[in-house]
Amino acid sequence: MSQPPSFQHPSIPDHVYKLHRSLYGLRQAPRAWFTRLHNFLISHDFIESKVDASLFIHHTSCDITLLLIYIDDIIITGSNSTLIEHFINALASEFSIWDLGPLHFFLGLESQPTSDGIILSQSKYALDLLHRARMADAKPCTTPMAATIKLSTDDSKAYDDPTLYHSTVGALQYLTMTRPDLAFLVNKVAQYMSKPTVNHWAALKCILHYIKHTHTLGLHIRHSCSTQLHGYSDSDWTGCLDD
């Protein structure tokens, strides 16, 4: 690397330094950090998930420990609190860490433990979304979209702020992680990202009014929840006006 200011050698100012380890801020630094942490986890018998490189799993004959990584933030949970505490101590002996205690807020998700499970919600994120969309003072609405609404690509004049439309729809997509009731609606308005119209924005505003009324809703995951996945499909008999 080039010699940084105030550390230039007076006799050889055009020479460069050879790095023996990664430095914070380099392009290679994130990869070097993940490799370091990855090797540590593997050495402690964690297995990297095949579907998510940031998820690591540790199995014993009776217990399971799950570890999720986002850069240098780590969430850990499992069926045995003693094993979790033991691993946190091992992690602290290898790296300089802060143990922030039970999880309450992570990447816009709010975690609230209950007597029978956990509630995941995004109330603060939803309110921030309304503020960014200039809808913080919107009146609450109990329904997100009229059942009879039919949107199409050319149903009105172009909306004058497509950037706001794009950013709002993108933010709504992240909100659907804990709000499956919004998934169909967001999918609907996302179909018109290339050329949003006034009617599309009106439909999007209806969703925002609904969010103002329901921003505290979330997912209640109970201890006894079944892991069986159920899927549902609804056919509207080619009701899309653009098909």
Image: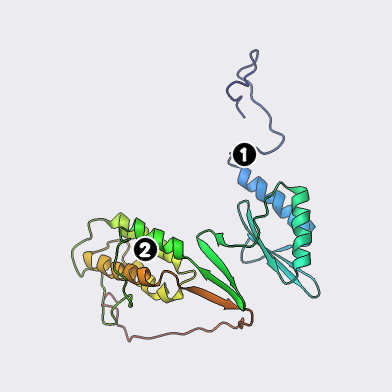
Q: CA distance from mark 1 to mark 2?
A: 34 Å
- Quickly name the residue at label 1: 24
Q: Position of residue 143 (x, y in %)?
A: 32, 78
Residue at the spot 61% in from the left edge and 17% down from the top edge? 13
Classify mark 1: helix, strand or loop.
loop
Residue at the spot of label 2: 169
The outermost residue toward the top is 11
- Residue 98 on image: x %, y %: 67, 51
Mark 2 belongs to which amino acid?
Answer: Val
Residues at circles 1 and 2 in contact by the CB criterion of under 8 Å: no
Number of residues whose C-alpha sits closer than 10 Å to that of mark 2, classed few (under 14), some (14–19) or many (20 or more):
many
Q: Residue at x 62, y 30 (%)?
A: 1
As drawn, is 104 to the left or to the right of 147?
right
Disc on the earlier residue, 1 or 2: 1
For the point 75% across and 51% down, the residue is 92
Residue 59: quarter of image: bottom right
